[in-house]
Amino acid sequence: MAEGASQDLLLAAAFVSDAQYNRNIPFKTSPEAVRLYYLYNHWIMRTATYFFIFLNLSLAVFEEPAVYPLPFLVTSLVEVLCLLVFFGRLTHFAKVTLRNVFWKDTKNICIMVAILLSLTDLAIYGVLRLYNMRSIRWSRIVRPIFLINFAESRQIRRAFRSIRNTLPEITYVFLLFMFSLLMFSLMALKLFGDRNLQTAEGLPYFRNYLEIVFDLYVLVTTANSPDVMMPAFDFSSWYALFFIAFVIVNTYIFMSLFLAVVYNNYKKHLKNEIRKLAYMKHRKMIEAFNLLKEEEGAQFVVREARWKQLVKLVAPDISNSHRELLLRISDDEQKGFIDKKSFVQLADLLNIQVITLKIRSHPLGQWMPRVYQSAVSRFLRSMVRHRGFVWTYDAIILINAIFIALDEETPYISYAEWVFLALYIIEILLKVYTYEPRAFFGKNQFWNWFDTLIIFAALTATVLNTTLKSTTKYNSQQILDIVFILRVLRLIRIVDSIQRFRVIMNTLINIVPTMLTFGGLTLVVYCVFAIIGMELFHGKIQFFPANSNAPHALECGNPALKDSLFARGKYCKNNFNNFASSFIVLMELTVVNQWHDILCGGRSKLELALSPLTPIILFANGFANVTVQPAKLYFIAFHIVMVIIIVNIFVSFILEAFFVEYSLEKSEVETAIEQKIQELGMGVQEDELQDEQLLDNMESAEHNLEGEGGTKPQSKGLVFKIASKRYRTVDALLQRMFEAEIPLEDEVPSFEEILNLSPTPAVPSSLISESAA
């Protein structure tokens, strides 16, 4: 009986943990499978999986063509090791998952196929290498599949699904855009093709239809504006109307339409994904409740002792104080049990970061109480806490910024640097004297740590720089660079001094985890295009030092680039000869503009010649010259995928997340936590935290809300607050974005019905969960 209850508790904890972290894995419920499932989700296992995924991706840096060459045997052994780890992880997943679910899951099939393809390609490449035959490592392009398809990467998969679901609507707009582009290109051919106009380089102007399509496509990005217009504009001012009309229609209307369509459809499909998560979480919590429920009168409940055991299993790291606080919220009337409605909220309660703050007095108040509590000491501390103290140092920072911009060689400027350093050190010492040191340097006090480290690093570098300057053989530009950078970094302090800046910065920090999802998405796209680019263009363009006497050094190692603007502009280092160079080229293609040419003016003849050739044109023409003209399609495809689709989706998501984080009020769960904290008389307001007089962000297991009798709160020395960074997981923030639009019913859909949900406003209430049935 006891063993069965223990197994039920372990299984319920697995369901609650899945609900907390939004894991949607239908695992087996046998005791052995549950223990394997706990091992599968252990942070060490997940960290090891990510390590080998990124190790596998990084092999491209060491394989031919390599940035840092390693022997083929070494890279092949590392790749085999990674594939074995992936296979072991997949086998582990198969052990805990239902067999029919495992084989129906597309991501598992993709991983197995990727492993087989990688091993096959590695074997073929190795055999051909023994016979000195060059082969293409075509399997490297499937390596990002491991990053996408393992269970840990559900956010990246969700982003890809949202892109896939958004593509149909984007396709219609894109086709309409292409129709407009082709029509304007045809008009341009008819208007300018027979005028015998030439570009600044002396090349024919708008006489080839495909070249016109390419140039006008680049004009949509404004990258070659106004250079592409100038030959026609020089011929007749009226021709400017054609380009103005083109920019209005295609740049301002169609590009804005792209963003609107992407934003609307991406939000719709993302909301559907989050709706699935919400229903799945609700369903898992109900299953956990059904495992632990006991009859109490006319209702089923979970006993307090059972609930505590469950929370200890799910969240073993939280303090006793925090655990007791959650119990007080769940069992508001202290009946000794938790009903179904309150129990289902447990996952959301665990996702809210509640900081346990321990009240301490200043050490000087204990060591020298008479001095620390004297009138002079109290006046000094009140002065430091006053807003005027902050304003004074804001003014000092601004004055320091002016001095940083002035000439360092002037003696008075050099002496002023010591004055500013002394003022900053005095500020830190005064704050440590006023506020409790462990609170001032608490683990969540980012700005205090940043400020202190920057000041003392600047002091160390300045002292070292002055000491070395006094010697006759001083020649260390690196130390000077460090000093200059640290001086500039000090100006960042002003961000924390202005309330609105602080709100915006905290908002950005809170949505960083969601931004990392799109960082993974971008990494996948970059890896795929970098590998394709290396196979297509490797060795076609070479970089030589300025003093090199190698043949064709001035033509980037390729006679086809003789007298080309690519070579004359010294773009030879922008090539696909290794993984790192490929990434740099793709980054340059992602950011395309030439606004600085117009602002700076006074360009040289070479700059005038190069001005139309922004990265997408310059690289496309350069690599097309050394291969074939259709090679331009590679660069156009990258621009469409990366800039038009992914960047727009990234902007859409950041807009939505920023609006939610910046403007939304607290959720019901957060409100309930704060109300209970205030009821217990153990709350602390945000404005009180500005002083940090008595607070330390270290949780203490020695303090809890139970008194000696277990009923009375022990408020002395302990307070709580909800952290400013409130979301433990990306999914928690996503659900927060759409929770008002996701109605949850007491009875939720079954697993299969949840997976098949379509982007509709609501789910029929008639759907019954499997567990309820």
Image: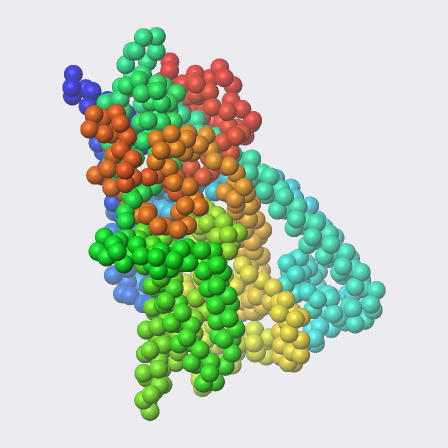
| Residue at x-position 40% and y-position 69% | 423
| Place of residue 337 in the rendered image (x, y in percent of width and height, measured from the top left) | 30, 19
- Looking at the image, residue 182 sits to the left or right of residue 578; the answer is right
Which quadrant is home to the N terminus? top left
Give the total number of marks visible in the rendering.
0
| Residue at x-position 66% and y-position 65% | 224
Is 614 drawn above or below residue 161 in the view shown?
A: below
- State the residue lying farthest toward the front: 375
- Looking at the image, residue 196 sits to the left or right of residue 258; the answer is right
Is 151 drawn above or below residue 496 in the view shown?
A: above
State the image quarter where residue 478 is shown: bottom left
- Looking at the image, residue 6 sits to the left or right of residue 257; the answer is left
| Place of residue 543 in the rendered image (x, y in percent of width and height, measured from the top left) | 46, 75
State the image quarter where residue 714 is shown: top left
- State the residue lying farthest toward the left: 2
Q: Nearer the viewer, residue 387 or 457?
A: 387
| Residue at x-position 29% and y-position 43% | 358
| Place of residue 695 in the rendered image (x, y in percent of width and height, measured from the top left) | 33, 47
Q: Nearer the viewer, residue 161 or 306?
A: 306
- Looking at the image, residue 423 sits to the left or right of residue 335; the answer is right
